[in-house]
Image (cartoon, rainbow, N blue to C red):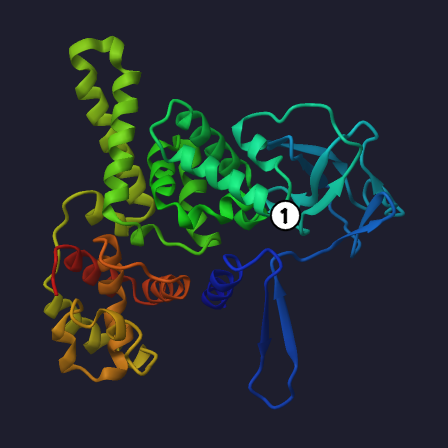
Amino acid sequence: MSAIALDIASVLLPTSIDAEVVLDMNNGINTNWHVRQFPLELKKEGTRFVASEAIVDDSVELWGRSFLDPLVEQSFGPYSLLSDSNHRPIALPDELHGDWLVYLRRETRVLTRPQYVRTVPSGSAPVGILAQAMAAPFGAAQDQALAEFLKLAGSDEPESAAALAELLKLVESLKGLPPVTFNVLTKLPAFPDVLARLAYCAQPDQRDAVMGLAFGLPFAWFTIAKCHWKAAEQAFGQASMELFKDLGADAPRFSLQRIEMARKAISERQPLLAPVLGECDAVPLGDAAQAFMRHAVQQIQTTHGTRYRARLATALPAYFQRFNQQYYDTLDAPCAAALAVRGEWNPTPSDIQHFKLIERTFPTWFSEAFAVSLQGYS
């Protein structure tokens, strides 16, 4: 069941904060199960809030984030029958101003969809560059402001480091909130240069949250083009030299060590990136394919086999043509992902979802074929 749960989550999380998966049993009864991201609802009653079901857990609290300072999460107190025997609707503090997101949380699990709340307008200025972009009016104006913020984060402008730091802090602070909660994070797949910089610049206690973004957003770390990784490493190296500039002649050595530590930390969390960020021994593709087909042919979902061949036929391995065409999509997936890293095409969100499925289902095959394909096998 854990594998099924992972498959459902991989479809549900990147899609929308309101996405729903409907499950049915193949028994003719047509009984459906509806799977959503949040187990409860936070319902508004006037100016107050009440949960859709009774909660008996003293670790559940009502939390919120101000649009003026979205990196900071604020607790409004416990919400449980253990603290309020009648489960009275809970009110937000009277002194709140501006726009907020509020939700129930149990430790690292968010139990309800964040609700938008508009209170008395605030005269305070947004805290930070990101908050300034988020303060733009909803719609096209905010989309443009957030896009400009992400362009800044991926640039070499003086304020880019501050923009990246705010983005890292936002990701670190999610703690159970799906990334699609924030419009700025939903735009990240269109900014692979920023994603690569986030991976390099993350502090040790931030990197797990950063690398976890790929589970909640429609992108894969292993399809980011190598040019973006090189640019991110170069920017990280320049920042490291600035950090160690007082060490004089030793600065390059310490900067290189810092780069190598970042590469290692990224690869440990996403092993498929090891051959992207550095050199890696690769199993010959023919040997890997033969071993895979011997052991897994009964597990492969058969298809028409044209998913990638229709677009990348001349770039994909001719070796696979000795197998039945119905297996092509599974065989081609890691090779097509490697072609994306090499900058030869741009996979769609549907392609990336398929890559993730094949990688999760056949990890050894995917890693071996991906690594050798990066070397230019075609």
Question: Where is residue 39, by image quadrant?
Answer: bottom right
- Name the residue: 50% across, 49% down: 186
Under tag 1, what secondary structure?
A: strand
Residue at 31 percent of width and 58 percent of height: 346
Label 1: which residue?
A: 110
In this orientation, does residue 182 appear?
no
Q: Residue 333 or 61: which is nearer the viewer?
A: 333
The residue lying at 84 percent from left, 44 percent from top is 48
Q: Residue furthest bottom?
A: 28
Question: Foreground: 71 or 297?
Answer: 71
Q: Going by the image, does 219 lie left or right of 262? A: right
On screen, residue 240 versus residue 204, left or right, reads left
Q: Position of residue 160 (x, y in %)?
A: 40, 28
Position of residue 35 in the picture relative to residue 331 (left or right): right
- Residue drawn 58% across and 42% down? 141
* Mark 1 residue crowding within 10 angstroms, few (<14) / some (14–19) / many (20+): many
Residue 304 visible from this viewpoint? yes
In this rendering, the answer to whether 342 lies above or below 291 is above
In front of the other: 281 or 326:
326
Horizontal and vertical percent position of residue 219: 40, 54
Total count of labels: 1
- Find residue 21 and report its horizontal and vertical position in percent: 58, 69
Q: Is residue 317 above or below residue 304?
A: above
Rendered-image quadrant of the C terminus: bottom left
Res. 70 image quadrant: top right
Measured along the vertical axis of the image, is residue 58 above or below residue 368? above
Which residue type does callout 1 highlight?
Val
Q: Is residue 133 above or below residue 214?
A: above
Picture coordinates of residue 243 (x, y %)?
Answer: 30, 17
